Amino acid sequence: MGRSFGIGEFLYLLKAIPWTLLLSLGALVGGGIVGLFIAILRIAPSRPLQWLAIGYIELFQGTPVLMQLFVTYYGLAVLFNLQVDAWPAVLLAFTLYSGAFLGEIWRGSIQAIPRPQWEAAECLSLSFPKQLWYVILPQAARISIPPTVGFAVQLIKSTSIAAIIGFVELTRAGQLMTNATFRPMIVYPIVAALYFILCWPLSLLAQTLERRIDATLGIKQHF
Amino acid sequence: MNYVFQFNVVWDHLPELFEGALLTIQLSATAMALGLCVAVVCAYGKSARPRPVRWVVAAYVELIRNTPFLVQIFIFYFSLPVIGIRLTANTAALAAMTINLGAYASEIVRAGIEAIPHGQIEAAHALGLKRLQIFRFIIIFPALKTVYPALASQFILLMLSSSVVSTISAVELTAITNSLASTTFRSFEFYFVATGLYLAMALGFRAGLSAIYWVVFRRGRAA
């Protein structure tokens, strides 16, 4: 029976973690740029722009990430004749995916800013972009931090799906090691534990931040 | 771009795709019902008096919420047989989906329970109701009503993530799309149409779940 699961195999799993993190970070940064545009379009004083943003969000929140990956992967291949390896397709798909979620999260944060703040900015005869940039966004950014951290956890977990189209990150490394050692009862729990180590601190951080921001806004959290 | 799209191949196989969509709907709907039961039991357990019960529930919720669904499926399908629990692909998928949804939904239900005004519970105590009776007759119904929108979006997320179970050869829309795509070599077209079907199912589920809300919580009830 194949090789056994030892230190070397464990190190192989550890070496896959940077790919999981790199993909998550890349998607978070790319998705952040897309998401900011979506959030602004969503609240822009123009109906067609709002519909555009709503359509984007519906499309990416209403379809499975796996399907988005397949369409991007094969889409890049057929549209641009790119026989690419998995990395650009995966990064693009996760960027578009997190753009939709971050867009919705940030729209919520922007709309949580009380109406008089907008009105006051307008009284100072600031234009819409300036109202947004100087008055609203700095305040909204603070509120948006906890849910954004929470989304980062969701994103790290979602990147496991990239394994299905052959991108070697933590989950794919786990599959490869299982195939080599025939020890699924050891490998997959270890993979799960590694994800847990990555995600749990972030989840706790999100909770703590949420409580702190609730406190500063003076909103009572529970009965 | 010199690729010729051939969607007519997809139309020829449309009945098979619809069959796959039906399987996805069945699988998701069953997991939603079972997962909600798990969630309610866990939410009750979290308010239980013995500390260990609360710890077990908290550990379950945190473990599931901080590891990827894909890895959970692998553990159910590949790891459990090692200790003698052998599930068919579709049963393993259903079990993983139920356990996964149970953890997420229990947090949502707990939030609903915390929003019940304390006076109601004290009034129930004053009437001499037992703990389980208070939970059944006073707490759970209004709690579920309060958090119903959050539960509904969690259900839809579950339906979308069910596409991932195709990796363990469970039969549903994604699995059927995969096999059609690889036999006809029209990957992009098939995944494109399947994505559209998922979008339609997400919208359909949303409409169906609001209909359920109307029937269960609105009809003939004052509160």
Image (tube, rainbow, N blue to C red):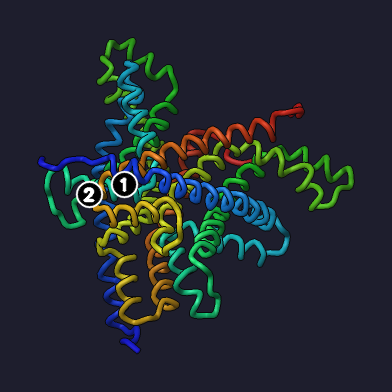
Are the residues flagged by discs 1 and 2 from a single subunit? no
- Neighbor class of circle 2 (other Cα within 10 Å; few <14, some 14-19, many 20+) is many
Q: Is residue A221 above or below residue A70?
A: above
Chain letter for mark 2, please: A
Q: State the image quarter where residue B123 is shown.
A: top right
Task: Name which residue type carries label 1.
Answer: Tyr
In the displayed structure image, the side of residue A21 where residue A148 appears, left or right: right
Across and down, in percent, residue A17 comes to: 29, 65
Q: Give the residue number, with chain letter if any, for mark 1.
A: B191
Which residue is pictured at 30% across the width and 83% down the height?
Answer: A7
From mark 1 to mark 2, how far is it between C-alphas? 9 Å
Which quarter of the rendered picture does the N terminus of chain A lie within? bottom left
Which residue is pictured at 35% across the width and 39% down the height?
Answer: A60
Across and down, in percent, residue A205 comes to: 42, 52
Q: State the image quarter where residue B218 is shown.
A: top right
**Residue A74's disc number:** 2
Chain letter for mark 1, please: B
In the displayed structure image, the side of residue A50 where residue B15 appears, left or right: right
